[in-house]
Every structure is written in structure tokens, then in C-alpha cells.
Amino acid sequence: MLQIFQHQKTGEIVIEELPTPKCFPGGILVETQCSLISAGTEKTSVASAKLSLLERVIHQPEQVKLVLDFIKKEGVYSTAQRVMRQLDSYKGFGYSAAGIVVESDCEEFSVGDRVAIAGAGYANHAEINSVPKNLAVKIPETVGLDVAAFTTVATIALQGIRQAAPEIGENVAVIGLGLIGQITVQLLRAGGQSVVGFDIDENTFELAKQNGCQAVFPSSKEYIKDAIYKTQNLGFDKVIITASTSSDEPIELAIELARKRGIIVVVGAVPMNIQRGKFYQKELELKISTSYGPGRYDPFYEEVGRDYPYAYVRWTEQRNMQAIINLLASQKIDFSSLISHRYDIREASTAYSLISGKKKEPYIGIILEYPKSDMKFLNKITLKEFPKHSDKIGIGFIGAGSFSQNFLLPALKHNDVEFIGIMNSSPLSTLNVSKIFGFKNAYSSSSELLNNPDIDFIFCATRHNSHFKFVKEALLSNKPIFVEKPLCVNQNELDEIAKIYQETSARIMVGFNRQFSKPFKAIKDFFKYRKEPMNIIYRVNAGYIPKSHWVQYPENGGRIIGEVCHFINTMIFLTNSLPQSVFAQSVSSSNPELATADNITVNLKFRDGSVGSLIYSSAGDPSIPKEYCEVFCENKTSIMENFTRLTLARAGKSKTLKFDGEKGIKNEIFETLNAYKNGSQMPISFEEIYYTTKTTFQIIESLKTNKILDI
């Protein structure tokens, strides 16, 4: 793995390839996605390492005292050797990051959890970090990992505010509008305080106003009267110092700004040479904020994982971190405007040239990214805009087999459409379907069908290995396409579809119809106010299909790609979350007629913490109904029995709903056509379609490798 270091003698920033650390005992191993360079703390470290030995002596007298003590104990030579070894060593950077759990040795976290992590020596600028459990919190899917990487730094700001304990409507001054100062302003605004900011750099003022300052002033005593005027000349109830300087000016300014019996909180690294006179006259209270909050620097809390009782220590450092994540999730605060630069970890030297001053450019929040090569462009997909369609929708249909004739075409016929053209492999079938459903034209090639200007929307229900070809052609023709599942049969095809989709204005819909059925819509509604993750069991008595059937041909991908996708997508719908990881196993049988891949158990972990277990079997008795799904969450349970019966239970009571067994195809077609008419996105997003499809590929790979795989 890669990690960033600084050589203590030369000050050079280096990126080294190191062995992956082991999982922290009772903690987690995290694959870092984003980490935040703490401009204040790390700037000090970078600057110190670049000083000459004499300059270091002048700037770090406490270290000189330590050396003198060693000389007394160990002698000059031994101490000199110790100092030289120290200078020839490397120092790691970073203490605020976010990523994905890849190994867990505790109950609180699971593989696949998205987490924010904290602590120098733990949340390093490194591809893999080993972290104690009390220095990590889960991140909901709605919060980006880049803004979540601010969590630790934001927690420092939050603890400073907790020390000040401002009440709603109070006047608070923030001295120092760097990164922590800007976050402090946002948090105070969210808490209902009136905030005035101060800084020596007027370039910070506009951002401070955007983040919630009612006014901003240069950090100078000549603006004290103007600032206090903003408080109706009462003075500031609380003053929070987030500046970092060797000057006494911030503390002197704070004393002038504070009202009588006000509170001053020191968060930044500033001297505290207090003049007794005014401090005494105003009867001020001075507080120091210790980093992230209670638990910091306590090895029993941070390393052993021994938590403080909630009733007695309400806000530990981990609970402070969770509070920041909750505020981000509720959009009470937003750190995206604080990101001024992004760099790949391999470009770290460029990033550090900013904070060292070598590169002259303003900055605030510098994010280091640890990208994976797998489908990075998916993160850049934006919602497209489409025109409305007021006329009858002209339908072009490819592949009119028995499923199309029994389900898709009748559903289409009940909507406001016009059957323009059909293409099918069998001329006889084409003739029959044309007459039954009234298609105007029959085609022998897809290109002819796609070139018909009267055709607005393509429907495709051919054999699975041909889906890629027709989807690609439709996208390149900028025509929307509904394709029966699966979207395609391998990862290369999926990647190419995703790339073309991004580059064109066409739309894709895949026939994952279960989520449109009345029973599953009722389940979604039953759990709509949930905050906790779901536990889902989906059992499919799939029925036997011989290996001689076309579905089982290797080029068509088999039943995992062809049908299991249905149930994966349904669980995505229920959890409203994308799958994070998967592990699959199949039965072991010597029966050559039994397709072992048709008899599998799949365990899925979703990004919101939910889990899903799918039992898919072709070895059951056909008299047993095909599909059965149980969902457990927040002391509630739902049981869906083959789309005919749904039991909903909570508070010791249950009710049963009955349905006609329809699996959602009619409503799926209606919502798809309605979205096209209204110029809306398809009912299932492309991101959901992509990850549903990718999951089936990973199931097959997991069966081969017997490993838990990321998705």
C-alpha cells in the first residue's frame, strides 16, 4: 500500500510502498477513499522539518530541554546518536479520513461499512489504515466520502463549541477563519447563534459569509467597536479562538470582544499570556478545548475501546464524530464548499507544496483521493434532461417470444402507444405478432428498425447474449430502450454500455419488475420511516431447467445473470441502498444433470448497513410457490408469499393483505412510458441498473473464488 511520509532531516515529502497493516485488535481495517490534509497542523510539521538545526533549537525550546535531560542520563555521544537517528527517520501525516471497512474484529462494524476515521497514527494519508473502533463512525450513503473526510477536523471545531456552550440567539465571535474557523461558523449557524468572524487574511471573508457569518472584520483592535456594535453594544457572549499563531493578539482581541462574564475558548495553537486587569474586571472564563473531546489521549478509550457511560459523558470524541455525520446527513452543514483542491495520493508532493508556500495559491480544504480504476467515470454521471412527448409513443419491438406476447405487449397495448415496427428471428412469429398487435412494419435488421423516424421507444426481449448489441445500437441512435433482464452478460459489455450511456442522451430501462408489484410497494411503504438497516431473506423455488435449454448456454450467462438479478434489484429497492459486498456458495453435487450454479445461497451487504440473504434453488418441489420474502427491521416484520399474500406485523399485531399474484409488469410498463412522456428519468436509475448487473457478475466470481467480494 502507499503512504505519505516526511523525512525529518530534509523535510522532503515522500510516498512509500509499505506492507498492508493488520487489523487493529478489537478494531477495523479500512481502505481509505479520501483523506483531508489539515492545513494548520500539517503546515506546522512541514515548516518545522525544513528549519535548520539552529532554527529548530530556537523554535522548539521544549525539545532542547528534552535533549539536555538525555545528556544528563545517557551522555553526549549516546544522545547525539539518538538525535541523529530521529532526524534520519520518517514521520507520517494525517488524522482525518474516510473509507470502506475491509476487515473487522469488532461487532460494531462490518466489512463494507462506509466509515469516517480519526487519530494521528490511525487515520493516516495511506491506502489502508488500521483503526480502533472508538475512532470510527459509520457514514450513511447520502453523505459523500469526500465531505466525510472532514469529520475529525470538524469534531475539533464542535468540541470547541461544546466548551463554549452557546445558547440559541447568543452572539459568538470566531477569531481565525481558516479551515476549523469556517467549520466552526457553519456549526454555530446550525445551532442558531449570531456569528461574527475575524481574520488577518481578508481573502477568507467571503467564504465566511457564505458559511454563516453576519459580519467579518480584520483581526485588529481598531475594529473592536464596529464588531461590538453588531451585538447592540453588549459584547460577545462567547469568543472562540481558532487561529494559529505565536502572537498574543488573538487572546488580547478576545478579551476586548467578550462581554462581562463572557467565555473565551481556545481551540487553535496560540499563546495565552493574559493581562490580568481586563480579564479580572470582566470576570471572564477561559477554557481550553482538547482536540476531539472526552476520550482523547486516554489509551483505555482510544486503544482498548472502553467507552464512557452515555449517561455521564454525553459527548465523547466518537459521539462528537457521529454528530458531525448526522449534521451532514441532514444537510444542516455542508463541507463541499470548503474543498479547494483535490489530489491523487501519488500527487501528494504537489499538495504539500501548497501548504508549505512553495506553490503560491490560496487553499482551504485539500482532499487526497485514493481512486480505484474500476469504473471511476460512474462517479461523474449526472442526471440528464429530456424533452416531453405529447403524442402517441411509437414503439419498435425486438424479439417477440412467448414472454413478450403474454406480458410485455399486452401491457403496452393498454397504454397510449402505437406499434410501428417489429423485428424477430422467426418470420412466422413476426407475422403472428404483427397481426395480433397491429404492427405497421416488420424488419429483418435492427438498423432498419432504429432508422424509422416514427419509432420513439425501443423494447427488446431477445436472448440474453444479444441484449448488449441492441442496447448499444439504441443508445448510439439516441433512442430510449427498455430491455428485458439482464442488461448484458459480462463486465466488459457493462463497462461499454456505461460509457456510451454517459456520452449520449438516450435512456435505459431494464425489466426488473418486482419492485413495481403491489406487495413490494406495500412493504416499502411499511418501512418508509425506518432509520435502522434491514435484514432480508428472499427464497426462490426457481424450478428445474435442463442444461440443454438456451438459458444455460455459457454465452447467455446462465440463471444467475438471467434471473437472480431480479431479486438483487428488489433488495436494492427495499433498502434504498446499493450493494457493497457479496459472498456466494453453491451446493456440491456429483449429479451431472444438476446445475450447481442454479442452487446457491448469496449473502449481500448494502451500503446503508442492511443485509440480504438469497436462497435460489432449482431442486425444490414445483408445488411450493416460487417466491417468498421476509423483511425484519425496527421490531417490524413483513412476509411476502408469492405476490398473493402479504403479512405486516408490528407491536404484537399483524394484518394480512391479499393480491392477485401480478409481479409488477403492468405498472412497470406504465411508469416507464409515463416517464418518457413527462421528460423524466427512467423509473430505475442507471446507477441501480449498473450495480444490480455488476452484482450478478460478482456472485459468479465469488462462487469461483470462495471470497467476499466488493461491488
Image (cartoon, grey):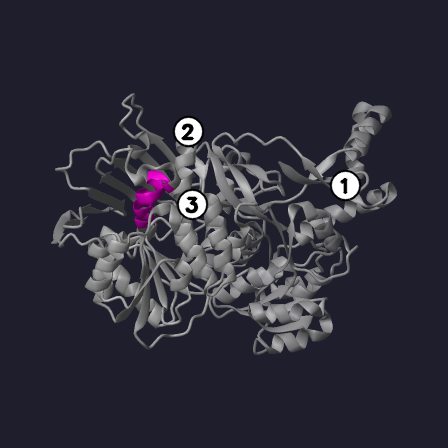
Task: Please report whichever mark, 2 or 1, sits nearer to the chain's N-terminal start.
Answer: 1
**Amino acid type of disc 2?**
Asn
| Residue wearing tag 3 | 694
Above or below — where is 567 with respect to 341?
A: above
Task: Please report whichever mark, 1 or 3, sits nearer to the chain's N-terminal start.
Answer: 1
Are circles 1 and 3 on residues that touch, CB within 8 Å? Answer: no
632 within the magenta span: no
Image coordinates of residue 701 in percent, x first then y, are: 43, 35
The Cα atoms of the two marked residues, 1 and 3, are separated by: 57 Å
The residue lying at 61 percent from left, 78 percent from top is 229
* Residue stretch in magenta: 556-571
Image coordinates of residue 108 in percent, x first then y, are: 41, 38
| Disc marking residue 706 | 2
SS label for mark 2? loop
Above or below — where is 122 with respect to 386?
A: above
Which residue occupies the foreground of this view, 388 or 168?
Answer: 388
- Toward which corner of the image does residue 219 lie, by quadrant? bottom right
